[in-house]
Amino acid sequence: MRTIKAQPFDFQFDPATTALVVIDMQRDFVERGGFGEALGNDVSLVRRAIEPCTALLKSAREAGLLVIHTREGHRDDLSDCLPAKRTRGGKTFIGEPGPMGRILVRGQPGHDIIPELAPQPGEPVIDKPGKGAFYATDLHLILQSHRIASLIICGVTTEVCVQSTAREANDRGYELVIPEDCCASYFPEFHQAALAMIKAQGAIVGWVSHSAEVIAALRP
Ligand code: C5J
């Protein structure tokens, strides 16, 4: 077993049964000129996760961890986008034209994972219609077939898709740690609050750490 210095206390894991899950690091959320910025968000707040994620991804690959990427998005005809999601968004809606193609539609340029964190051949990419990566996907099946027990979760945004995925993972029995610098939000106060909720009450959902600590624990 390895140990990551984490909050509220050290996180124990076995690299052989641990996966890195990178949530929705897509052009539309993270890049300048994408959907997120078009909505008036300051994307520099989420871009700060790119460098730590890149370093952690490299380290996870070198350590032989299973690496999984997710993308939030929908079918071209939006038949997998429920009204409870499609009618939200304020001014702009899923499926409408955005600066990088139709918003959150698979195959559109904005739906792609940013080149810095591009999946390598053989790394599963989970296309998810919801916020949590387990909902209506085969993520749990893939993790089970690899005998995965622990997850390192990164990505955007902390309080939406990262937190939803962490809660789904905890309900399914996975232990999980979130390196705080590897996830981000357009709302820094929501980032902080989501992480505080996850680690509260003796790690009620999971642990919070930092990329440097996770990378140190992954070194041979
Ligand atoms: C993600 C969102 N990925 N905020 N999506 O967090 O809609």
Image (cartoon, rainbow, N blue to C red):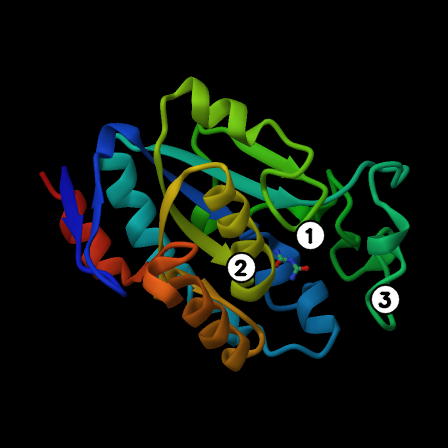
Query: What residue does disc 1 label?
Result: 110
Q: Is residue 15 above or below residue 28?
A: above
Q: Tell me what residue is drawn at x 27 percent, y 65 percent.
A: 8
Q: Nearer the viewer, mark 2 or mark 1?
A: 2
Q: First in sequence: mark 2 or mark 1?
A: 1
Residue count near mark 2 (Cα–Cα under 10 Å), binned few <14, some 14–19, many ≥20: many
Kindly indicate whether the residue at mark 3 contacts the one at mark 1 (C-beta within 8 angstroms): no
Q: Is mark 2 within 8 Å of ligand 1?
A: yes
- Identified by mark 2, the residue type is Val
Q: Tell me what residue is drawn at x 24 percent, y 44 percent.
A: 59
Q: Quadrant of the C terminus?
A: top left
Query: What residue does disc 3 label?
Result: 92
- Measured Cα–Cα span from mark 3 to mark 2: 19 Å
Q: In this orientation, which residue lies closer to the viewer: 16 or 91?
A: 16
Q: Is mark 1 within 8 Å of ligand 1?
A: no
Identify the element where label 2 is drawn.
strand
- Identified by mark 1, the residue type is Gly
Residue count near mark 1 (Cα–Cα under 10 Å), binned few <14, some 14–19, many ≥20: many
Q: First in sequence: mark 1 or mark 3?
A: 3
Q: Is residue 124 above or below residue 43?
A: above
